[in-house]
Amino acid sequence: MELTEIKEKIKNFKVEVPSWGFGKSGTRFHAFHIPGEARNVYEKIDDAAFVNKITDAVSAVAIHIPWDKVEDYKVLKEYAEEKGVKIGAVNPNYFEDEDYLFGSLSNSNLKIRQKAIDQTFECIEIMKETNSKILSMWIPDGSNYPGQIDFNKSFELLEDSLKQITKHLEKDMTMLLEYKFFEPAFYSTLLFDWGTSYMLSKELGENMKVLVDLGHHPQGTNIEFIVSLLSQKNKLGGFHFNSRKYADDDLTVGSLNPYELFLIFVELNKFFDLSAESQNQKISLVLDQSHNVKPKIPAVVQSLNNLQITYAKSLLVDYEKLKQAQENHDVVASEETLKEAYETDVREILREVRKEKGLPEDTIKYLKECDEYWKMVKERESAY
């Protein structure tokens, strides 16, 4: 691929940012206050818009319900658009309501199960008002002890709930099923791996696909292989980008496993043009991170930088050369073809792209010296 084409693709590469990435977050031990953190959904949109202003890499803002609940979602939509961003995926919250102690969409209590279904219907209505096309579903239902639930019955109840929900989706809406192998349930989780989500998506229709979160797998899982398989079957609907050392750590994407991230992008490029304007209709690319010790806006900017670097490297792969080496069973040449691209320093390419777009060439350095950013931090801290 020519350098000019690579630069154009990087210019058009955009990622959805999470509202919760700008607000207060923490672990089960404590949530520390980080100076400048957003206090409501409107400030979260302000922060996303500011990040987009200096990176031009934000496609939309994912929202979490009820965390981001407002009285008028059309007003929220208009506010976001005035700021230069859109409302992205709508994420129902099934893990904080007291009624969901023993499950939400799979709860054996019909009243509670219906409450979770109705909550999801509400999110679909929010999608209509905000023109969102993605319903992003992470369902934490499971069990902590042997014998606590009947596996088959619980899964049947979950499937029945999802069937009811899919009937309410409009034709241009997509439900993404996110899996996670454990936590908050520690013995069993109903949607515990990609195969479970894939099976349900096959049974429940074309507008249901699988969402891959990089931190939701057992140690050593070959995520790039999962990406390839789901893409081949047209069932890969989206990504939650983050990084981890042990479990679902939600650290800055690319901070710990940059080569794995690169290999994932290599597979994505075989099936998707991630720079196309319509790419968000085909695959949803979203940051999903909890910035517990980093300042929020710099953490998001750093994440976007890491994704741009990784995407640029993946575009440098000579895919024809790789294919030929694979067909010739030349293992060394196959690996070296990937390493040649991965080990290339692409930072100068990114600086050129930003310069051509009139953006700060070094966004992290820019933030440290940006009066607008520090004024915002100071104003929020004065009201804290």
Image (cartoon, grey):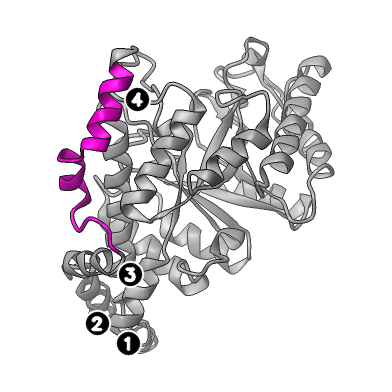
C-alpha gap between disc 4 and disc 2: 48 Å
Q: Is residue 152 left or right of residue 183?
A: right
**Which mark lies nearer to you, 3 or 2?**
3
Task: Relative to 330, say whether 162 is above or below.
Answer: above
**Which mark lies nearer to you, 3 or 4?**
4
- Under circle 3, the secondary element is helix
| Residue underneath mark 2 | 333
| Residue underneath mark 3 | 314
Q: Earlier in the sequence, mark 3 or mark 4?
A: 4
Image spot of residue 25 (x, y percent): 38, 23
Q: Earlier in the sequence, mark 1 or mark 3?
A: 3
Q: Earlier in the sequence, mark 3 or mark 2?
A: 3
The foreground one among 145 and 338 is 338
| Residue underneath mark 4 | 37
Q: What amino acid is at disc 3?
A: Ser
**Which mark lies nearer to you, 4 or 1?**
4
Q: What amino acid is at disc 1?
A: Lys
Task: Relative to 86, say whether 382 is above or below.
Answer: above
C-alpha gap between disc 1 and disc 3: 14 Å
- Under circle 1, the secondary element is helix
C-alpha gap between disc 1 and disc 2: 9 Å
Q: What is the quadrant of residue 294 in the picture?
A: top left
| Residue underneath mark 1 | 321
Residue range highlighted in magenta: 358-381
Residue name at image x 62 percent, y 15 percent? 97
Image spot of residue 176 (x, y percent): 63, 47
Quadrant including the N terminus: bottom left
Q: Looking at the image, can residue 46 be seen? A: yes
Q: Are marks 3 and 4 in contact (CB under 8 Å)?
A: no
C-alpha gap between disc 4 and disc 1: 47 Å
Q: Main secondary structure of the magenta part?
A: helix
